[in-house]
Amino acid sequence: MTTSTAPFSGLQLQSKVQDSGELVLSLATVQTPAPEADEVIVQVQATPINPSDIGLLFGPADMSTATFTGTPTHPVVTARIPAAAMPGMAGRMNEAMPVGNEGAGIVVAAGASPEAQALLGKTVALLGGAMYAQFRRVKASQCLPLAEGTTAAEGASCFVNPLTALGMVETMKLEGHSALVHTAAASNLGQMLNKICQADGIKLVNIVRNAEAAAALRGIGAEYVCDSSLPGFTADLTEALVATGATLAFDATGGGKLAGQILSCMEAAINRSILLTHPKEYSRYGSNTLKQVYIYGGLDMRPTEIVRNFGMTWGVGGWLLFPFLNRAGVATAAAMKARVSRELRTTFASHYSKEISLTQALSAEAIAAYGQRMTGEKYLINPSLG
Amino acid sequence: MTTSTAPFSGLQLQSKVQDSGELVLSLATVQTPAPEADEVIVQVQATPINPSDIGLLFGPADMSTATFTGTPTHPVVTARIPAAAMPGMAGRMNEAMPVGNEGAGIVVAAGASPEAQALLGKTVALLGGAMYAQFRRVKASQCLPLAEGTTAAEGASCFVNPLTALGMVETMKLEGHSALVHTAAASNLGQMLNKICQADGIKLVNIVRNAEAAAALRGIGAEYVCDSSLPGFTADLTEALVATGATLAFDATGGGKLAGQILSCMEAAINRSILLTHPKEYSRYGSNTLKQVYIYGGLDMRPTEIVRNFGMTWGVGGWLLFPFLNRAGVATAAAMKARVSRELRTTFASHYSKEISLTQALSAEAIAAYGQRMTGEKYLINPSLG
């Protein structure tokens, strides 16, 4: 088997926060050096635009101020960053940062080690940043070889959404809860979570923002679906919480009143059960059952507003996949990854509304669409298209 | 030694939420039955009005609507409860609830057991509710006998504030933090916490709301005092957090932006240290250091507003003394109580602005004062005054 040692030259999407108070997005031509013995070079063919990627890509810039310059093959996007957000940007100031958490592609060069050589010509999935690029050099051990016949597009979202959905279930077990609430529940991730919970017999309350999303979830068998755009939302949610006993929620939106509403409805559901079974246990501090909301995304960028009417036994906090995998331990993390491999084309199948090139990813039209962070508007970049 | 077995008749302050949407406060004359073998009857001589008592006393009533009727010896206070708050009151509806978490007094009757008999005539401190009353029947085991020469007034606040202050330090140790932040820090509890931290060599950042409180704390040796009424507050707080490394805060106010500001300043302090020592560790998700704020009171009844600009490794939650004591375990709880006994007249000395009778506690003047929940306006009820 031959190994290419020539450096690969290709486009890489970069995001820069400038001390002038501007965000600049552009495509740079970068050289990918020959792989070390334990490394491979992957030609990236599919890499999704996840909400977590958009956070790094746009930073706190106001994209309604975006201007589009440059050339057709090397577009440049410039947008204004609110002055209040600049102090938080010190860590990435004036640095051109590559973007893209995960992706998949074909191994076009490999180092001398047997592990690296074994991957040559294979289609593999990758996690590790800088995937919005035509070539990516990684350790052979970072590659997840896809089963024969699986395309790069099918394997592009192997990690972030599948492991996050499984991580929610594992968090539930680890922290002693017995059912789950999920918001923005019609997302790709939300659909995966429904399939996992149905397979594992876990009750799941799905919170969605419109009737279409509710119908989509019911269409894949979701039993508890609450539409926050309806006037009876909190009553519906409370009923679902009584039925499921869920005391743990994962919230992708983060901002506004939703996290607090979930806690409030959980407390009402718990108290209804207490009043039915142990009516004398009233405590002015509220129930002693822990009610927890983890915010794992920021689809709603407003402040989180919590009306504290649910006693004192509650928590709201941030949740991220990687710290959780560390906390869960090696065995649990390995079992989660093995399940993703086994069920990649079923439970963990992703759906994209559009496949675009790197150049198109910087067009006004595409940014207007994927920048909305809307459920169902998920884009896949194919860097090999240019 | 003789034991009185006659029932004691005395006044008890009661708080009732009526389904008409009104709160009614009144004094009832109640009979205290003769004690069982393992019980004693305490004539309550001193019982503080803690913020946690005010929560049960007023419920969610709008005290600006209070009307004052009844007779000079049996005053009645009536106030309107906002309709939105009524559903949360189901558990206490139309029930006359006694009030008062803790107090102290003299044992005037005792059951036949040696433990009960040993307390007869002694001044004891008590925890357990219904202390705003002239007599209180309790288990002998619930009584903490005060050292010879200690008055009921000196022992009245033996439990809630001292154990809460010690509980904050124990929580810090249990959860792996190394320094503390405390808000409304000039309170009785805040002064105790300063004494504990000075004695134990723990760095404490005190957040206060005005210059008088700041001066009072500096007067008792506080090193880090930040006044939230000053324009440079968040800069001052960040400096204090850099100096102390505090990543855990206890917030008595609960409402408004303060909890979020603390998290934001903690993150800024952590990132400043990272940029000095490991500048390449920038993560768009923010630092991986857990930043935690526990809300243990509700001095500010507005919603909690959290501007999430501090990464994903954070938590905000409720904190209550009794669940914490359970979590800490018997040995830790016993050590905390023993320390309170030893240092009751030094570290854990409480100060009251006024001593009032039960009748006076229901006067417009008193309610206007203690109802403000202001630092430094702490009232002590002496039920033996009538």
Image (cartoon, coloured by chain):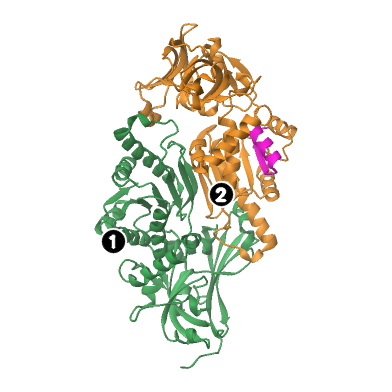
Chain colours: A orange, B green
Q: Which residue is at 68% across, 35% downward?
A: A195
Q: Residues within 10 Å of mark 2 (few under 14, many from 20)?
A: few
Q: Which chain contains the residue that carries disc 2?
A: A
Q: Which residue is mark 1?
A: B199
Q: Which residue is at 36% across, 51% downward?
A: B180
Q: Which residue is mark 2?
A: A175
Q: Is residue B347 above or below residue A238?
A: below
Q: Is residue B214 above or below residue A129?
A: below
Q: Residues within 10 Å of mark 1 (few under 14, many from 20)?
A: few
Image depth: mark 1 or mark 2 in front: 2
Q: Is residue B314 above or below residue A282?
A: above
Q: Which chain contains the residue that carries disc 1?
A: B
Extreme residue toward the bottom, this view: B1
Q: Is residue A335 visible?
A: yes
* Residue A281 locus on image (x, y percent): 61, 64
Can you tell which quarter of the image residue B70 is in? bottom right
* Residue A184 locus on image (x, y percent): 61, 34
* Residue A212 locus on image (x, y percent): 70, 29
Front residue (pair B93, A223): A223
Q: Is residue A228 visible?
A: no
Asked which secondary structure carries label 1, the reply is helix
Badge 1 and badge 2 in a common chain: no
Asked which secondary structure carries label 2, the reply is loop
State how far apart marks 1 and 2 are (Cα): 36 Å
Q: Which residue is at 58% across, 14% downward?
A: A356
Q: Is residue B154 above or below residue A3?
A: below
Amino acid at circle 1: Ala
Q: Which residue is at 58% across, 83% downward?
A: B33
Can you tell which quarter of the image residue B195 is in? bottom left
- The magenta region covers A189-210
Front residue (pair B71, B158): B158
Amino acid at circle 2: Glu
